[in-house]
Image (spheres, rainbow, N blue to C red):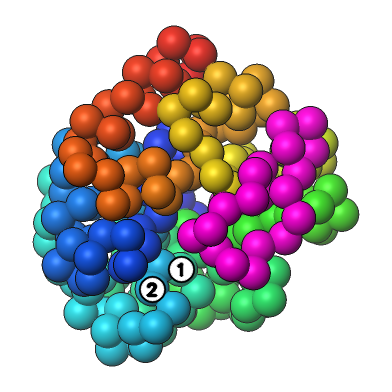
Amino acid sequence: MRRLDLSLYLVLDPDLCGGAAGMVATARAAVAGGVTVVQLRDKGAGTSGLIATGRALRAALAGTGAALVVNDDVEAAVAIGAGGLHIGQGDMAPAAARARIGAGMALGLSVETVLQARAVDPAVVDYIGAGPVFATATKADHAPPVGFAGLARIISASPVPAVAIGGLKAAHAGPALAAGARGVAVVSAICGQPAPEAAARQIVLALASAGG
């Protein structure tokens, strides 16, 4: 299994980025600005669409050191040769996902409660996405927001590193790290911004000033 640098984790949104080409361009710029992980999330693309976009993303990120993670679709993740797969509580079981992707690919799991965090098997899951910290329009079916106090409780119960997610901006870097997160996951703070590279740099500076 792989350990990812969770410092600044970008979740791509096809609507905010302007489709597949926009996601690739945004990812390239964001990584130049300091993004360490790029997650391809496009629920409407289907496996073939994800594979096409994912291969373009992998080519664009080659040599940068940033990891490419695919959301939910294990077939696409394997076909792309992605660095990781991220699944939610309602997706396939983590053990089944690990069996499909093998030992070399990172596996992330969305965790919304302390009980879910305690149930994480560190032999199977490499990191959790903890939250949502705040309500967010980029994921309509998200769980109730937990705030930073709830985030801290979830992270303290987790046996693996956590990245905080849910409506986060540069100003939230300090509180997220103080709650125990290894980094922050963002969507609209970079996706759809007029200058994704500059937006990413702003968050990197905020993380650095917070001790991340």
Q: Nearer the viewer, mark 1 or mark 2?
A: 2
Label 1 residue SS? strand
Above or below 75: residue 200: above
Label 1, residues with CA under 10 Å away: few <14, some 14-19, many ≥20: many
Q: Quadrant of residue 30?
A: top left
Helix or strand or loop: what does disc 2 sit on?
A: loop
- Please give the name of the residue rendered at 44% of the width and 10% of the height, measured from the top-left corner: 209
- Please give the residue where the numbered disc 2 appears in the rendered image: 42
- Pointers 1 and 2 in contact (CB under 8 A)? yes
Residue drawn where x is 52% and y is 39% of the image = 168
Amino acid bearing label 1 = Asn
Observer able to see residue 40 = no
Residue 25 point in image, percent of width and height: 14, 55
Residue 178: image x %, image y %? 65, 20
Q: Pick out the residue farthest to the right.
A: 115
Front-most of residues 156 and 133: 133
Q: How many numbered circles does the render carry?
A: 2
What x and y, as percent, mark residue 157? 81, 41
Q: What are the residue bounds of the magenta stretch? A: 125-150
Image disc number at residue 71: 1
Please indicate whether residue 54 sits to the left or right of residue 91 in the image.
Answer: left
Indicate whether residue 180 is drawn in magenta: no
Q: Nearer the viewer, residue 76 or 169?
A: 169
Q: Residue at x 73, y 48 (%)?
A: 145
Query: Residue 10 location, x and y as percent?
Result: 38, 48
